[in-house]
Amino acid sequence: MNRQVVCLALAILPLAAAEDARQIVEESQRRGRADSQRYEGSLEVVSANNKVSKKRWESDRLGAYGNSKAIIRFTEPAEVKGVALLVVNHPDRSSDQWMWTPAIGRDRRIAQQDRSTRFFGTDFSFEDLEERDVNQFDYSLQGEEPIDSAACWRIESKPRQGKSSQYTSSRVWIRKDNYVPVQYENYVKDKLVRRLVEKDIQNVQGIWTARLLEMTDLGRKSRTILKLENVRYNVPMKDDDFTVQALRRQM
Amino acid sequence: MKRRFLGAGFWLLGLAAAGWGQSFTQRGFLETDFIGYPQTAPNDSGQAIGEALFRYEAFDKLNADWQFAGGIDARADTHEQTDRAWELSWDDRQTRRPSFEVRQLNATYAKKKLTLVLGKQFIRWGKADILNPTDRFAPQDYLSVVDSDFLAVTAVRATYGGQSNTIDLVWEPLFTPSRIPLLDQRWSNVPPGIALTQLPSSYPGGSQIGARWNHIGKVAEYSLSFYDGHNTLPLFNFQEPQASTVDIARYYPQMRMYGADAAIPLHGITLKTEAAYFTSTTRTEDEYALYVVQLERQAGEWFFIGGYAGQVVTEHRSLFDFAPDRGLTSAFLGRAGYTIDTNRGVALETAVRQNGKGEWAKLEYSEAFGAHWRATAAFTLIRGDESDFLGQYRRNSHAMLALRYSF
């Protein structure tokens, strides 16, 4: 019996060692996969001089990594109520994004080169709101490093040629026990510009979900805390509700 | 009939609000503005104006297919730009702004690739930012020419298509004109010593129709559009019943438009262009083309838009018109903005005529306080020659302070 265990361990060890960064990221994405996701986001934007402004949005996402579509619609504060962003992710290229501003009755496509701009006064850039398809990046395992006492893999990703990104490279920490990403660091050349920390990880309908995201803009020294409320997966949604045409009829 | 329709619409909204719908949302604001003009105008000695606007909009999603939208504006001012009569306006045909106005009231049916909107609604076409030659279902309130605001139209709009290709068909049975400057106020620029009397306007019967095909490609977006109806901007007939007295009547020429627009991301910058050619069966209306070419870029906390608007007149026939869309052509246009922080921002808009005879620039600072309040301070500078569309308003440079409570 003991010999069998030893043999099994010896068989698995090289396999585990061979588990490369890309496989870890793929497994992480596989475990977070759902047909759809809906949540209400509560945001606190804390400026460098500790001024706090609060916002709320509702988010719907249809599909999973690489081929998903999402609509984020502000519900507070009152002056931006109805402002919405449509993100259409593609497996082979950067996402398409359109913003709807009801006050002027116009939608506007967010051009690639404008994706480094902050999204409506938060510390998330437009690019941060798109999903990272595994095929658009090269990954390398940098080592292991615990975050909040949880063992994590530290993986570096670099955009492949043809993938447009404001970031030269990113580092992601993925927990070994449940494959949940708990921290991202985004670099422009060698300078760390944004850090995203994911906390309050709970199992929602069988999917480990970070309910608190804190994005820090290190250049501006400001941070945005996003709390995910009423998270639901596999909510019935229609593909036709994720088009520019549908964006315009958002209330 | 009109009143019954209005009543039915608000009854539906009320019913929806009472809990019939899947979701009910509302928004609105109360804004008070103070506008100060350093100079008097020959026909208007007023230099300080106060305005108040209350806007309320409600939306209800009755079920997966149907949703309703309604909105109302209530206004008051100190300069008689707003009607003193307490009447609810639907068609926006008053020369002054109505004290109460149905801003929008419409029902939307959406099923698969079809979206049908019926009722009073805003329809915006085109992709350019400062001037949109193809935006023909978008009359505007030009009482203060350089601070215009869009008016809704009564129409049926059917949009069919998915993400890549959409066809937009519009039928507007009730003509909504643009609101032009009042004859006894500074933006009409009437020379001193002439008494003008405005005769009742002649509004066109019949319908306005339009179609637009829009394509969203991997790289670029472009569209073709067609409009057949009337210009929302008037021509004028003048009569002189007595010396130094002139009667003036507005009429709205027939217009047909063939238009196109495109947005093309280039390396580091986005090119947007929009052009339209206008013909008319009205013998006193010009035939002409308008075009806009602009570049835009957002970088960090900055955004920049800069471009040129041009005009080619193929047949000149009109003598007296009011055409701010054409007045902004043969000009370099620009807009820039900087977000200071999450609550504060500054913006600059400008138009400079190619011949140097007219310039307009507006500098604006805006700051939010808490979740509901926003204060805005702006200064508009207008310079130029009396013969120029912009230059004629050279005595109308002004400062504005606005305080808005949003809910």
Image (cartoon, coloured by chain):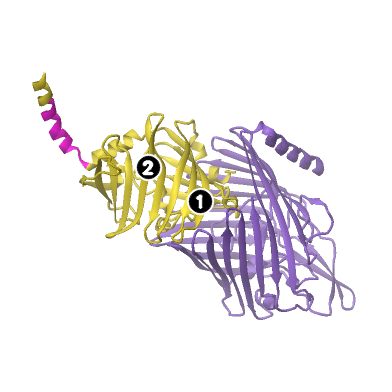
Chain colours: A yellow, B purple
Disc 2 and disc 1: Cα gap in Å? 29 Å
Q: Which residues are magenta?
A: A8-20
Answer above or below: position of A147 versus A118: above
Image height check: is B354 above or below B76? below
Where is residue A141, by image quadrant? top left
Q: Residue at x 62, y 80 (%)?
A: B357
How many callouts does the rendering have?
A: 2
**In the picture shown, does residue B398 fall above or below B81?**
below
Q: Give x and y (percent) for residue A75.
A: 56, 46
Q: Amino acid at mark 1?
A: Met
The picture places residue B214, in percent across and down from the top left corner, at 52, 49
Mark 1 highlights which residue?
A99
Identify the residue under disc 2. A199
Q: Give the side of residue B337 with respect to residue A144, left or right.
A: right
Relative image position of residue B336 (x, y in whole percent) = 51, 67
Subunit ID for the residue under disc 1: A
Image quarter where the N terminus of chain B lies is top right
Disc 2 residue type? Lys
> Earlier along the polypeptide chain: callout 2 or callout 1?
1
Judged left or right of residue B87, residue A133 is left
Q: Nearer the viewer, residue B188 or B104?
A: B104
Q: Residue at point 82% right, 52% down?
A: B87
As helix, strand or loop, the secondary structure at mark 2 comes to strand
Q: Secondary structure at mark 1?
A: strand
